[in-house]
Every structure is written in C-alpha cells, then in structure tokens.
Image (tube, grey):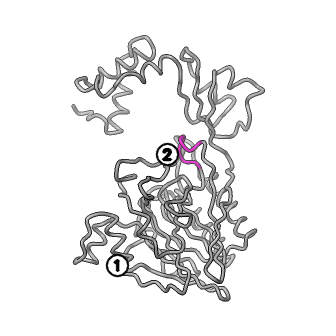
C-alpha cells in the first residue's frame, strides 16, 4: 500500500505582490501525475490547506479541482485542518465528501477519528488530529491536567485505543520538536522559545505508538526524532529564506508485515525561487541571466545605492521579489546594537538616523510620512499618537 504525505498547501498564498495560484495548480498537477506513476492508494494532507481562514474563490476552486481529481482516481484522502484554516469552513460538506472517500477532520469533537484501509493482507488505520489548542481539549476532558499543547495532545492520544495488529498512521498539524532540538524552519514561520506562529511545542515521543506520523506546520521537509515522524514541508517555496530548500513529498510504502519504507519524491516548481548575489553588472550580464521567469531575491554588493534597482532588475527578471544590499554601509549598520541605541529614541528619530547612515543624506518629509504609514499598518507604532 502506498500513501503520499502532503502538508501546508497554503492555497491562495502570494509571494509579496505575486499571485501564486497558477504555480500552486502546476505543483498539484505534478502531484496528480505522481499518484498515477506510483499507484498511490491514499493522500495524507496535514493541514494549512488554505493560506487564510477566509480563502479566495480561486483557492477554493483549486482545492475542489484537486480533490475531484484524486476522487476520480479512486484515491482516498485524509485531510486535517491547520492553524491557518477555518475549522468550520473546511468542515463544510464533510459527510458528503466521506461518501467520495475524502475524509476531513477539521473540528475536534473529543474523539481522534479513524479511517481504515485494506489491501490484501495490509491493514492500515489512519487517525486524524486537526489543529487543536489546549482550551479546546479541556472542554472534553475536564478532569485531566492540561496546561499546554503537549498535555492536550497526550491526553487525546491516551484516550485513543489503537489496534497494534494494524499499521497505525497519524495525520496532525502541530509544532513537534525532537529530543532537545527544534525543527529547522522554512522561513514562513516565526519561532520563539516555545512556539512557532503561536503554536506550542509538542515532544515527538508522544507519538511512539504510531508507525508513521504525517506532520504539517513546518515548511522545511524533515524528520523529527525518528524517520517515521516527519514534516512533508510545503510543496512550494513561500519565503525568501526557503530559496535553498529542496521541496519533496514523502511516499510511504506499507508492507503486509507492517514494515514501512519512505521515499522523498522531489517536487519541481513551475517557477523556482532563487537567491542570487553580486554586483548589478555581474548579475545582469547577458551570460549570467538564466531562467528569467523564476522568482528572484537579489543581494547587491555594489557600494553605491542604485536608483530604481528594482525597475532595472525586472527588465531581465520580471518576477524579482526583493533586492537588498550587502556592502560596507550595511555591514557597519549590523555592528550597531539597535536595541541599545534605540531604547530612548522616538520612531521618527530612529528612521532619520538609519536613513542618514544608509544613504548619507536626510530623509524627506514625504518619505517619512510613507514610513510612518507603513509602520502604523504593521502595528509598530500608533499613528494616532
């Protein structure tokens, strides 16, 4: 029996101002081809199906297309919600979808739902754990001591009876850490001591009873603690920090005796995201311009700031996402302890100092108003002050 593990589709996501819906359709079509080539029996989708709780029409149409195509092939789908998804919206039509072998678990109701697959002597139980918070789990287990996400997940699993004569697989969307190590982030996430995107850590050892754990939430594909506890990662690069990542999808083969093998199948995008570095002249030399349709993050090493660098770059690379500099000016800025020097300064004073250091001249009133407006939108300052 073969199962394909996916996660973090983030349908409807943009890369800065670039719409990725066609890139997402392209990669889903490659995944459909993969299911044909490898005779896949089931697809595990580990949450963050959409990028926003209220997805765009294009995103919902794309998910509909993907699920219909999988259903046409007779492939069973096991889908859980992630922290980006709306539980209720993703739950809509759940019973109807189940009649088409598309099983959705997006709202935790006190039970870890299970669906079974049989292929000859191969017996597999797939358990689906939607994204949960400790407060949700306390509602169903009021007598249990639940103070953290880790406590919550352990209580759910302790109250779930597994048939150990079957191969047991869990699909979940949580921040799971290894023994003394945090997972490597893809760049679209933020991390604190205990959280990623406000999702608390869960120890991978709580999944010891499962033969394979299909995780979502971290965008960099990787194992956690053991090979069979794994993040599929996002199918596309959704952050500039993911430029060096190699995206893949774990293909899990379950033998009749319960043995599991894992193959990481590469996912090649329609347009790659690349980070290039050098002087403007070097990077735009005709002999160096390759795959101009790719998304480009360029770091310029020119000492002087180039006027309209983005406009110039997009003549050769129309999908340039970002340009920054690495030169003596930037390096001198990095040596300054911004927090220490900025503690007693107002926002406008900090911006003036930075602008002066970066460009060697004073910021104009118009430019300052733009900076203040942007900071207000981001919540850095209160524009009413």
Residue visible at 55% across and 67% down? 228
x, y percent for residue 88: 40, 70
- Mark number for residue 187? 2
x, y percent for residue 22: 64, 52
The residue that label 1 is drawn on is 110
Viewport quadrant of the N terminus:
bottom right
The answer to whether residue 91 is left or right of residue 284 is left
Q: Is residue 340 above or below residue 303?
A: below
Q: Is residue 120 above or below residue 74?
A: below
Residue 92 appears anywhere in the view: no
**Toward the viewer: 280 or 52?**
280
Residue 96 appears anywhere in the view: yes
- The single residue placed furthest to the front in the displayed view is 179
Residue 238 lies in the magenta stretch: yes
- Location of residue 73 (image quadrant): bottom right
- The single residue placed furthest to the top in the displayed view is 361
């Amino acid at each position: 029996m073969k199962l394909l593990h996916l996660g973090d589709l983030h349908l409807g996501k943009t890369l800065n101002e670039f719409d990725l819906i066609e890139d997402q359709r392209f990669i889903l079509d490659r995944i459909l081809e993969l299911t044909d080539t490898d005779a896949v029996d089931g697809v595990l989708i580990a949450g963050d199906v959409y990028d926003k709780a209220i997805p765009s029409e294009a995103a919902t149409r794309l998910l509909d297309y993907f699920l219909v195509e999988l259903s046409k092939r007779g492939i069973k789908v096991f889908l859980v919600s992630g922290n980006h998804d709306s539980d209720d919206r993703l739950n809509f039509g759940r019973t109807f979808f189940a009649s088409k072998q598309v099983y959705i678990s997006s709202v935790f109701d006190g039970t870890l739902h299970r669906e079974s697959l049989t292929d000859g002597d191969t017996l597999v139980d797939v358990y689906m754990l939607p994204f949960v918070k400790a407060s949700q789990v306390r509602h169903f287990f009021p007598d249990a001591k639940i103070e953290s996400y880790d406590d919550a997940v352990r209580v759910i699993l302790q109250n779930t009876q597994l048939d150990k004569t079957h191969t047991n697989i869990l699909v979940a969307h949580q921040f799971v850490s290894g023994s003394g190590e945090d997972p490597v982030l893809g760049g679209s996430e933020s991390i604190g001591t205990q959280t990623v995107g406000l999702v608390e850590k869960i120890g991978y050892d709580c999944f010891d009873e499962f033969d394979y754990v299909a995780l979502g939430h971290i965008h960099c594909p990787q194992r956690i603690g053991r090979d069979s506890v794994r993040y599929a990662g996002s199918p596309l690069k959704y952050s500039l920090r993911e430029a060096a990542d190699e995206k893949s999808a774990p293909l899990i083969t379950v033998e009749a005796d319960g043995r599991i093998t894992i193959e990481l199948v590469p996912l090649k995008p329609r347009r790659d995201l690349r980070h290039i570095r050098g002087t403007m002249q070097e990077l735009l030399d005709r002999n160096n311009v390759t795959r101009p349709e790719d998304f480009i993050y360029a770091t310029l090493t020119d000492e002087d700031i180039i006027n309209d660098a983005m406009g110039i770059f997009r003549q050769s690379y129309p999908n340039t996402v970002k340009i920054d500099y690495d030169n003596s000016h930037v390096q001198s800025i990095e040596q300054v302890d911004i927090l220490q020097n900025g503690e007693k300064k107002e926002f406008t004073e900090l911006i003036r100092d930075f602008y002066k250091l970066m460009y060697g001249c004073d910021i104009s009133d118009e430019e300052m108003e733009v900076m203040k407006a942007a900071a207000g939108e981001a919540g850095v300052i209160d524009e009413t002050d």
